[in-house]
Image: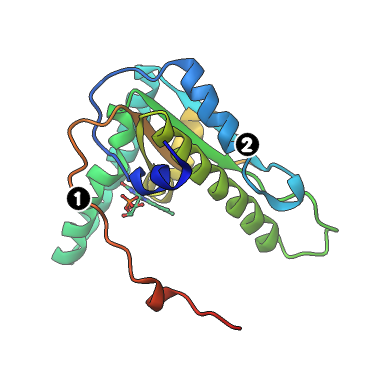
């Protein structure tokens, strides 16, 4: 598959056939991930590959519990509905043969004079680039995947506890990976370039 075909074929696959993702393929995806551009080559990322079902289920349980409590506490029906819908978008990693918890830490390449938020953002930006590489590599190898920030947004502390993540590392999101179940159902449309690009010169 040529590069542009890989880019066109990549989509967020959230349902999996159950076929395994062998370690050698995971390693190829991770090799692609760590080739990503990153702030001053500080490589402020870490990838926790989870194939153990019991761990995925524990992770699922903590996310579901936080979401259920939020749905229960919401008084506005529209918010209740939105939170309920987020469930499926937050726990697909539990059904995926492999889930990768994407961790970042604050960028350590600065002079120390930068605000803490700058160092954190640079860590996050670097990890995000790695996630994009990983998902493209997964596509090139015939797998599907989906990056999800929602589990971290809803249950960051709980998931970090399950995974034993220690500061300064923090959970960015979880990447679900597997052989997609069924054909690509819909192509998420993109805005035309005219709308999102400005050429100067
Ligand atoms: C920062 C970020 C956060 C995302 N969070 C979630 C998420 O929590 N759950 C999910 O199922 N998909 C999530 N996605 C996937 C997007 O929904 C998806 O990329 C987008 O709808 C475009 O669809 P496509 O990837 O199929 O082209 C996220 C993607 C990004 C880049």
**In front of the other: 164 or 47:** 47
Q: Residue at x 58, y 83 (%)?
A: 200
In this rendering, the label closer to the viewer, 1 or 2 = 1
Q: Is mark 1 within 8 Å of ligand 1?
A: no
Q: Residue at x 33, y 39 (%)?
A: 63
Please identify the quarter of the rendering in which residue 188 is found.
bottom left
**Does residue 125 sit above or below 167 in this rendering?**
below
Q: Residue at x 27, y 61 (%)?
A: 189
Query: Is residue 137 left or right of 142 when viewed as pictured?
Result: right
Residue 176's x, y, as percent? 37, 34
**In front of the other: 180 or 64:** 180
**Does residue 145 sit above or below 192 in this rendering?**
above
Query: Label for residue 134?
Result: none
**Does residue 125 sit above or below 47 in this rendering?**
below
Q: Secondary structure at mark 2?
A: loop
Residue 104's x, y, as percent? 60, 44
- Circle 2 sits on which residue? 34
């Amino acid at each position: 598959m040529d590069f542009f075909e890989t880019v066109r074929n990549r989509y967020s696959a959230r349902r999996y056939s159950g076929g395994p993702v062998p370690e050698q393929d995971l390693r190829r995806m991770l090799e692609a991930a760590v080739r990503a551009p990153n702030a001053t080559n500080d490589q402020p990322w870490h990838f926790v590959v989870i194939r153990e079902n019991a761990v995925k289920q524990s992770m699922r349980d903590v996310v579901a519990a936080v979401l259920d409590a939020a749905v229960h506490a919401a008084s506005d029906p529209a918010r209740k509905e939105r939170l309920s819908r987020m469930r499926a978008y937050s726990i697909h990693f539990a059904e995926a043969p492999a889930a990768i918890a994407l961790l970042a830490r604050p960028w350590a390449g600065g002079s120390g004079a930068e605000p803490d938020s700058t160092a954190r953002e640079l860590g996050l930006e670097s990890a995000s680039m790695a996630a994009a590489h990983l998902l493209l590599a997964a596509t090139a190898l015939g797998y599907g995947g989906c990056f999800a920030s929602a589990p971290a947004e809803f249950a960051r502390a709980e998931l970090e506890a399950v995974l034993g993540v220690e500061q300064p590392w923090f959970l960015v999101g979880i990447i679900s990976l597997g052989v997609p179940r069924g054909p690509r159902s819909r192509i998420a449309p993109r805005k035309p370039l005219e709308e999102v690009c400005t050429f100067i010169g």
